[in-house]
Amino acid sequence: MRAPEKLSEIVVSQTVVAPLSRAAIFLVVCIRQDPDSYSKLRLFGVDLSGLIRAVEFRDIEAALTCIVGFGSDVWDKLFGSPRPAELHPFREILSGSRHGVSTPGDILFHIRA
């Protein structure tokens, strides 16, 4: 399989707004800083929706979702221009007693079921 060269080749709509779920995890990942890693990540992005469907098929009622966000530092190396207008490094988020820490990661996965 060929690694996509442009963001428009791998855009898949993600279920960002959804009802509360029983289980959720945030996973922040740093990518190795070499061209081969970026190519592999592009291929992973192409296959991610198929992987989610394959896992979800085992328990459709679990409503598995996976949202993926890319940090501003890795964006250019993965997708080039144009950059999203408001793309920025992951920032700390505070909301009442909840605290989302700032991370040095390149990719954020939010996995829910």
Image (cartoon, rainbow, N blue to C red):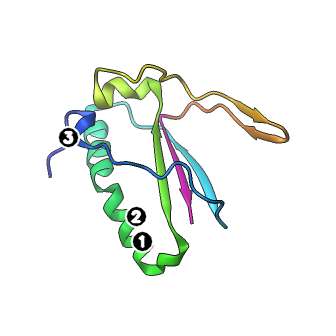
- The reply to whether dot 1 and dot 2 touch (C-beta < 8 Å) is yes
Q: CA distance from mark 3 to mark 1?
A: 24 Å
* Image spot of residue 64 (x, y percent): 50, 66
Q: Residue 96 occupies which quadrant of the picture?
A: top right
Q: Amino acid at mark 3?
A: Pro
Q: Position of residue 24 (x, y in %)?
A: 62, 59
Q: Please state if 112 lies on the left or on the right of 2 as rendered.
A: right
Residue shown at the point (47%, 23%) measured from the top left:
87
Residue bounds of the magenta highlight: 106-113
Q: Which residue is mark 3?
A: 4
Q: Residue at x 34, y 23 (%)?
A: 76
- In terms of secondary structure, what is the magenta stretch mainly? strand
Q: Quadrant of the C terminus?
A: bottom right
The residue that mark 2 highlights is 52
Q: Which residue is mark 1?
A: 55
Q: Disc 1 marks which amino acid?
A: Val
Cβ atoms under marks 2 and 3 closer than 8 Å: no
